[in-house]
Image (cartoon, rainbow, N blue to C red):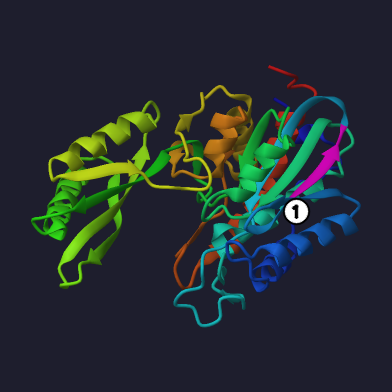
Amino acid sequence: MASLRGWGVFNPKISLREFETLLRRLIAIPSISGREHQLSAYLSNLLSSRGVNVRLVEASGCGPSLLAYHQFKPGGRTLLFYGHLDTVEPEGWTSPFRARLSKGRLYGLGACDMKAGLAALTLAFLRLREISELRGRLILAMVSDEERYSRGCESLIGSGLLRNVDAAISAEPTGLRRLEVGKMGRVAFKVEFSGRPNPTVRAAAFILALERLRLKGTPISTISVETGLNGDGRPSLCRVAVDRMLAPGETFNDTLAEVEALARRFRGKASLHPRPTPYMQPYRLNGEEPIVRALKEACMEVLGFKPKSVLGLAGDENHLTVRCGIPTVTYGPKGGNMHRPNEYVELESGVRAAEVYVAAAIKFLSFELGKP
């Protein structure tokens, strides 16, 4: 693979000040799931003002996703930079949209998940456009609704705009020392208990059985419990929502059979929990995938070490890899308190992630590397 040392006067370094300025602006723009419109418009205008070809893709029930394109020399590969615009609700925050810097950490809603990743991808994309020697195409995708139903990703898949993409880098936070070369899958079930004796008692016994499975290593958990009452105030129905992660090799049918069998022990009925988009199937990439090699070698050049290959939790990356056939790795900044008050990102880690993206793209799109 090509080395950065072969690129003459090109400087892959990203400015800390530039990164912080952009990240503060992104945090200041609310983009809670389903309400990403303002942030999508801001980034579209920012990129368009730099001469980037930008396209907005509408998605039902949420803000539009954004695609930005840059064509290098003809031929070569197509690489996708991928991130999501949305954040969770700001529960427990006092000033979620006002970024605050303390001891190298920038605090704010979405600072780590994943507006630091968006800032890093944006700056890396703009820096890469300065290189004339590369072949192929670079696409930057920023999608809506990742935190809920992946409707932004679903609209991109349905549009056909992701055809002919050779690989993708997602900027979800991994802490720089971890590279997610695959993802666990995820599926949710609803289990209903009705009739007599008291359905809530049988539901409670079912939940305890689930907990015993979890303690033995099965990645399963209870996420909600609802009850319905008869006119006499006695429970007539109890509904339990169950979340199950899938390891590579496991299938939806296998896990449904597992939950159904357990539910029958307590006279319950299990079914797939309704969802407007497909659930995520698991995957794991081979260590020799070009994008895995490119990212690891980029880390070695930029950071001086290779990250550990791990599996991450389910996300849009599952859809990109399993349904679209796009080998997707996940690598991003370091932070904490995600989905909680006082979420933060370590600023320096965001800058280093951006520099790794630049280096990895050079390696992946380099004419020396060629097609596999």
The stretch of residues the image draws in magenta is 66-72
Q: Position of residue 325 (x, y in %)?
A: 61, 27
Q: Position of residue 15 (x, y in %)?
A: 74, 59
> Which residue lies at the image location 46% right of the left edge and 34% below the top edge?
281
* Horizontal side, residue 160 vs residue 54: left or right: left
| Residue 77 falls in image quadrant | top right
Residue 305 visible here: no
* Horizontal side, residue 78 vs residue 295: left or right: right
In the current view of this chain or complex, which residue is farthest to the front?
231
Residue toward you, 130 or 280? 280
Q: What's the magenta bit mostly, secondary-structure-wise?
A: strand
In the current view of this chain or complex, which residue is farthest to the top?
372
Vertical order, 266 against 49 (above or below): above
Q: Residue type at mark 1: give it.
A: Leu
Q: Position of residue 350 (x, y in %)?
A: 62, 56
| Residue 235 falls in image quadrant | bottom left
Q: Which residue is mark 1?
A: 123
Residue toward you, 41 or 275? 275
In the current view of this chain or complex, which residue is farthest to the left?
197
> Which residue lies at the image location 11% right of the left edge and 58% below the top edge?
201
Residue 159 visible here: yes
